[in-house]
Image (cartoon, coloured by chain):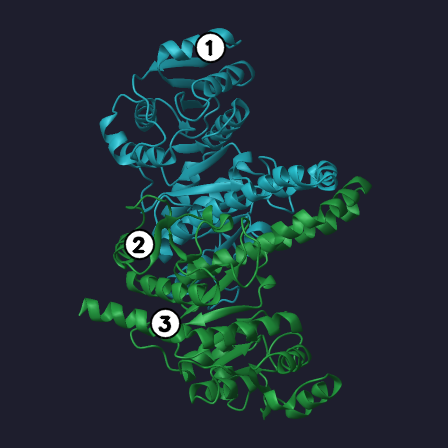
Chain colours: A cyan, B green
Amino acid sequence: MSQIDSPIVALDAMGGDGAPREPVRAAATLSRGTNIHIQLFGRSDLIKAELDRVEHNPANLTVREASQVIAMGESPREAVAQKTDSSLVLAAKAVAVGEAHALVSAGSTGALVVSAATHIPRIAGVKKAALAAVHPTRERSFSNDRFALILDVGASLRSDAEDLLFYAMMGHAYASRISKVPQPSIGLLNVGSEEGKGDEILTKAHRLLREESRLNFIGNVEGTDIPNGIADVIVCEGFVGNVVLKMAEGMGEALTNLGAWAFKQKFAWRVGMALLSGGLTQLKSVTDYREYGGAPFLGFKRLIIKAHGRSSEHAITNAVKVAAKGVRGGVAEQIEEAVGGFERRRA
Amino acid sequence: MSQIDSPIVALDAMGGDGAPREPVRAAATLSRGTNIHIQLFGRSDLIKAELDRVEHNPANLTVREASQVIAMGESPREAVAQKTDSSLVLAAKAVAVGEAHALVSAGSTGALVVSAATHIPRIAGVKKAALAAVHPTRERSFSNDRFALILDVGASLRSDAEDLLFYAMMGHAYASRISKVPQPSIGLLNVGSEEGKGDEILTKAHRLLREESRLNFIGNVEGTDIPNGIADVIVCEGFVGNVVLKMAEGMGEALTNLGAWAFKQKFAWRVGMALLSGGLTQLKSVTDYREYGGAPFLGFKRLIIKAHGRSSEHAITNAVKVAAKGVRGGVAEQIEEAVGGFERRRA
């Protein structure tokens, strides 16, 4: 699938709090301004009703009927197994057989992880796929062209040293193709910055990462370094990545609540809050992973992007654009090559 | 050691950025206002020179000569093994043989962990000691009487289900004796709040915690819940606890930097920052673990309190008071009893 100029993206039109309205509007906007072809999976009556309300270019859109919807609260495993006619499962299957190049959904993360794992082929050599969180950092202005990535944030819980190396290869491939940073810096999340820190898994991962000369490995990083944006890509096991991601969300909420609270408390604080809002927004963007449209789920032969459940049309538009950019840039092929190279050198 | 009314605390007078000045001043203050007896370990010439400058009650102070100092950058293992005449090692030995009831140091955390592990007897049944971080939470006004505890934050890296249960028992004993909360709520840090979440270790820990009827176990908690203060005690393995603790510190630094940055940027932001400083201080206290004088290192027959490296006289005073309160309340005995009860029921 190299050299694809007009990527086909399978979009789960029923996923996310704003579905089907926000995904359909995103597709309509993209149909008019890009050469991305979007397959909208979902209840065709609802999708068409939304499309009728907005300008769109029918040549770049296909509506594909799916009678079922996987809701946020459902058990991912059961839902994916039983709802074989759901928008998500049908979209994943379309991607698996090559009818589309990438999959985008703002629905349940668990269901996306399970349906991808069930239907979409893994890259040879990759034992564990990894869900990445993409976030801006304090030092950086945020755009698609500069971001920090942390992976895995919960596709699995535990990792061995080789998994961590593969996360780094996948993060490198994604960051170097999607951002404009040709050699993204890679950090290994650990309990100290010195080389010998951590248990056997971490010290072995450190060695493997150092030996992999194609990676710009900067060594161990600590919790303190996450908000500081010391590395473009931070690798860690899914358990700690998940806790860190959610803790950042909690901190973001605390900041939001501080705003609401300050507003209620005192006139001086209310004025202060208003004057400072630009500064707080900058800090909040460090903690609010929602600002970024999509988080990649890496390790598969096709590109998979999870958009946040509360995604607006704008956020889903960004997620689809990122998916298309990844397809054009050959992110999956790049990961395949890196993993293959490692396996050959080891053999 | 039950029913101790006049606790003897061994204080490392050479530990921390402000040593020996801040620890000695803290001891001087305490000697005049409490019935805590403090043994000051360190270079007696330096300690006496500091004491000469401040009012103190000599009846409540003993100066114990230690010719060596363990510095912050030293390898904990080597330093503790080689510097047998250091203030920290001599203080730990004094506690071990019962010359003092508790140990307080603001020096290197690693050296304190190693010297305690080397010299101070562990409570029978406790395989892994746990370092706890104590912090105020958003919902709460902060005082010694209400705090949240997270443990382990790095005394070891990995934990099995039983270690996590013992962390909960130790956290319960400490929080119920030091705070005024008789039944502190306990949460298990996990990747989701539902009961079946996590790997085998976590699901087994969940079962053990639920079965332990003396604990007020509220179930799994997530990263989001840490800044929200949903539980009085959060238990987790040391690796993730360490990352979480340092990430909170990094967030606190980001807030501080935001202040400095806003001050430089625009007059409006400068005014806003000044008006808002009360609100930001409240939020910052959520992320700044330094605000609290001491973090307990639990699982030993004596109480051990680590004060922050940048502790002022005030912070060290608090740490010593907490140590004395823990001695009077019988925290170590309470842990011994809880662990013993579990072992008997299992047998």
Residue at image location 41% in from the left, 82% down from the top: B120
Q: Quadrant of residue B65?
A: bottom right
Q: Nearer the viewer, mark 3 or mark 2?
A: 3
Question: Which residue is under mark 2?
Answer: B202
Q: Which residue ends up furthest to the left in the rendered image?
A: B347
Along the line of sight, which residue is nearer the eye, B198 or B280? Answer: B280
* Neighbours of disc 1 within 10 Å: few (<14), some (14-19), many (20+): some
Residue at image location 29% in from the left, 60% down from the top: B161
Q: CA distance from mark 1 to mark 2?
A: 46 Å
Question: Which residue is under mark 3?
Answer: B334
Looking at the image, residue B257 sits to the left or right of residue B2; the answer is right
In which chain is the residue bearing label 3? Answer: B
Residue at image location 79% in from the left, 40% down from the top: B268
Q: CA distance from mark 3 to mark 2?
A: 25 Å
Looking at the image, how many numbered discs can be counted on the residues? 3
**Mark 1–mark 3 CB contact (< 8 Å):** no
Q: Position of residue A25 (x, y in %)?
A: 50, 16
Residue B95 vertical placement versus A300 (above, below): below
Residue B331 vertical placement versus A230 (above, below): below
Question: Which residue is under mark 1?
Answer: A51
**Mark 3–mark 2 CB contact (< 8 Å):** no
Q: Quadrant of residue B297?
A: bottom left
